[in-house]
Image (cartoon, rainbow, N blue to C red):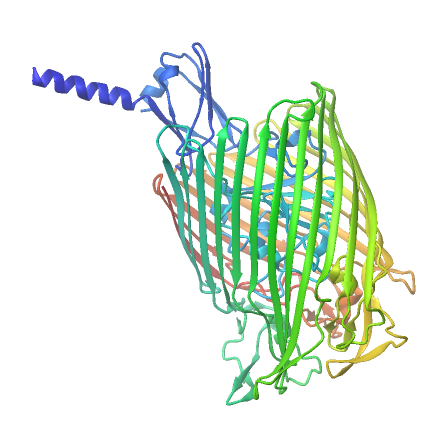
Amino acid sequence: MKRTLLFAFVFISINTHTQTLTVIDATTRQTIAGVVLYAKNPVASAITNAKGQVKLNVFTGADSIYFQHVSYSPVIFSYSNLQSKFFIVELTALSISLDEVVVSANRWEQEKIEIPYRIAKISMRDASFENSQTSADLLGSGGYVYVQKSQLAGGSPMLRGFATNRVLLVVDGVRMNNAIFRLGNLQNVISLDAGSFEDVEVLFGPGAVIYGSDAIGGVMDFHTLRPVLSTEKQMVITGNALARYSSASNEKTGHLDFNIGLKKWAFTTSLTYADYDDLRAGSHGNSYFLRRTYQDHIHDRDTMLINDDPEVQVESGFSQLYLMQKILYKPVKDLRIDYSIHYSFTSDAPRYDRLCLDENGDGTLDNAEWYYGPQKWLMNRLGISYTRTTGLFDQMRLIAAFQNYEESRHDRKFNNNRLRNQTEKVNAGSLNIDLDKKISDKITLYYGTEAILNQVGSTANRINIMTKESLAINTRYPDGSTWQAYGFYVSAKYKIIEYLILNGGLRYSYYKVKADFDTAMFPFPVVHTENNNGALNGSIGMVFMPTDSWQIYVNGGTGFHAPNIDDMAKVFDSEPGSVVVPNPGLKPEYAWNVEVGTSKIFGRFMKADITAYFTYLDNALSRRNFQFNGMDSILYDGEMSRVQAIQNITRAYVWGIQAGVKILIGKGLELNSVLSYQKGMEQDEVSLVDYPLRHAAPLFGSTHLTYERKNLKFDFYSVYNSKMDFEDLALSERQDDAPYAKDDQGNPFVPGWYTLNFKGAWYINRTLALNAGIENITDRLYRPYASGLSAPGRNFMVALRARF
């Protein structure tokens, strides 16, 4: 009797256990959340939880159970099939598809095939395999974003010939661009943690209708990890851990994130710490890029030292800490309230290109010290989403955010005891309200409003490093200056017929800048200035879908950049012998863009896409010679300097082509290649001759040959960049030629280059994965366009990941 009862108990336990099904990735073996299951006989539906699991009680006896997920190929199994598979279903990631869902186009989820813009998407799955060190590197890994680096602790993205304050950074619906984003290269993107993203979208071309100022070259939209609720009564805990080492910079990175999901509450925590030593460059290439000497302060004296290993870029290392905490509360079905706090802290970061500067060519470096102080970024964000069909909207989302930025610059000339310190702090508040409304089966309306307020704090002093005497000096920006922007937008999607969709929108933006100048430190011609203006932007586009596997689109739109504090009111030495002074009379620069593109799937083995575009920039802001109080040169920081200012004195245009092809060769092999070509020109205001535009990168791209099978993935790939001759460089780059190699005539130029690379992953089980790779296998010595730092030489990388 006891034996019979025991057998019955075991049978019931096993039977109960088999009612839980787990869905996993066929390659990575990791569980997949959000997989939709449904059946028609009996009628039933369910969705996998955060652990990729789902109860199958309602599907018992079903002859066909459908499994669907936007990132994976759909499959169908009967209940008996699932029993034979021990209730484990493997899904294969979609390599070729036009059915992606994106958010960046209208701030709401939409099918990419219905959008008349080029959008590139980097998924968490791809990012985990790539193992990018920083978010700037992650952007560059996609093949369509070019990244400039003045130092290792940096990364300035370029999109379609535009960069810095002409492209927009957005994180979780909040703009990162602030009042001191400059025309020169920026490093703010590394404040974001490459290990805490769910995905990244890059929208190319003007996005001003939805995002306002700065979205001329495009928008980089970062989506960080989202809190996940439990679909069961019990608490669900999931997480990831990473330890990574790479040899070129002696990188040591550790990462941990975890999610605690309850029925109505969810908590997501993420922590990353990374430490980098001085970066080692390659050994085969242009010897100009070697670091043969470096400076040090020994026994109270600045000293020039011989670098015993010139491939090591002395004074390039740094460290960084990222923290993120999110809380989600869902009291009822229609309402979601989420709060998050993000914090990033970067150690002192040497400005490598300035430390290598030898303006006189006499072998003595110009600067004894030049470094950025800790770059700090803190963001508090509150989001409220409400979903219910009303007369005004179907979905409404409010995002209120407050950000605090801090950055500083510290420099001292060689054999000069005076260390200059400049510190900037920006408090940035923003409020976004976005709504959508389905008017009919054919028309969907998107509309919203935005308000932004930035306040800039700026301090500066000069300290004698020997006596410690401190003296207040002129600040980089007017302390207490403000930048405000307000906007309202409306856009619509009109499905004329099933395969023809019209998209269009309008936005009006108004901005206001206020600044008070301290004439005690610098003889400004004015004490107070205000600058306010408005901009009307629009876009219209058409999508034509001859078949489900073919998209053709055309669009036209405008973008603008509203002058900010950095444009209008900055005083700084842009390069030796030049000083930039304020110019309060600036107007917005305005961009006009047209593009046409197509994407097509051929059979089940190939996808090809190509986009051609032309962007015209009117009233373009550019740094040019200027007069200050009637003088073309003034004494600044002890040096007679040519006066310059940011001015609306030019026009510019960029045209280019972006293309990609993906081929499924078979048996797990896949070939993927992307290519970007852009040509930018800027008019010289004196001669009226067009010259190359700064930030228009040379031809660049990448080609990957990948192999995927159960538990394994390998990627052999090449990244490449064409040559730029002296005549291809912008006028400012010909003058400030320090980062560039020299041709036979002594003129700066950018040598072409390519690298060969290999990465692999062994997905040991559902919990552990081992990644390893060799980057720059041939140890090429090269420097990407506009960069002041040489790229890593041969780099060995190994990473261990755990998922729980």
Q: Quadrant of the C terminus?
A: top left
Position above or below: 776 against 671 = below
Residue 730 coordinates in the image, percent (x, y): 78, 63
Residue 162 coordinates in the image, percent (x, y): 73, 53
Residue 803 coordinates in the image, percent (x, y): 38, 43
Count every numbered label the image shows and give the total.
0
| Front one among 52 and 684 | 52
| Front one among 59 and 607 | 59
Position above or below: 640 against 239 = below
| Front one among 645 and 21 | 645
Residue sticking out furthest to the left: 1
| Front one among 162 and 485 | 485
User: Would residue 601 be visible to someone looking at this image?
Assistant: yes
State which quadrant residue 101 falls in: top right
Residue sticking out furthest to the right: 687
Position above or below: 387 against 193 = above
User: Which residue shows up at 52% across the image and 57% down it?
Assistant: 344
Q: Quadrant of the N terminus?
A: top left
Is residue 586 left or right of 319 when viewed as pictured? right
User: Would residue 616 be visible to someone looking at this image?
Assistant: no
State which quadrant residue 798 falls in: bottom left
Residue 472 coordinates in the image, percent (x, y): 67, 78
